[in-house]
Amino acid sequence: MAPAYFAARRDETVVEELHGKKIADPYRWMEDPDAQETQAFVDEQNKVYDETTAGLLDLRACVASRLTKIFNFPKCTCYTRHGGRLFFEHNTGLQQQFVVKMQEDFDKEAEVL
């Protein structure tokens, strides 16, 4: 049985002209994650997903555990030098965002910007 998807509203009034072509963007309203309508849509989509995968909780936990183990390692971008200082980004493993750091030289301590 196919899941009952929550129908997303199409806003036919949003049309842009790019390089001489008219481009419709009926789901532009979804780009605002803080809008009540967007949050309601996401909640409904999550509800459909949870209902559809309810029998897979053990598998979901197993996959989540494995992915956590795979991606939990320190990551660092290449250094770039600007104004005599070294800049790079660092992630300890499971941080959602990299942290921008700066240091005076390779033998100096890095500081978070």
Image: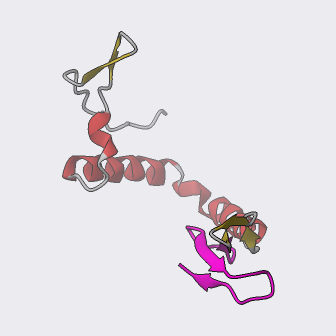
Task: Name the residue rendered at 19%, 22% in the picture.
Answer: 13
20 vs 85: above or below: above
Query: On the rendered structure, is 59 left or right of 95?
Result: right
Residue 94 within the segment the image draws in magenta: yes
Disc count in the image? Answer: 0
In terms of depth relative to the viewer, which is nearer, 46 or 82? 82
Would you say the magenta stretch is mainly helix, strand or loop? loop
> Toward which corner of the image does residue 88 lie, by quadrant?
bottom right
Q: In the image as oriented, which residue stretches furthest toward the right?
A: 107
Whether residue 111 appears in magenta in the rendering, the answer is yes
**Is 59 on the left-hand or right-hand side of 34?**
right
Residue placed furthest toward the front: 83
Residue 23, relative to residue 105: is it above or below?
above
In this picture, is 93 found above or below 82?
Answer: below
Q: In this view, does 56 lie to the left or right of 74?
A: left
Q: Residue at x 22, y 47 (%)?
A: 37
In this view, the residue in front, 85 or 1, is: 85
What are the residue bounds of the magenta stretch? Answer: 89-113
Q: Where is residue 80 in the image (x, y as percent from the top left)?
A: 71, 64
Return the x and y of residue 75 as percentages of the image width and height: 74, 69
Residue at 74% across, 66% down:
79
In the image, 106 versus 23, the foreground residue is 106
- Residue at 54% from the left image edge and 51% from the top image edge: 53
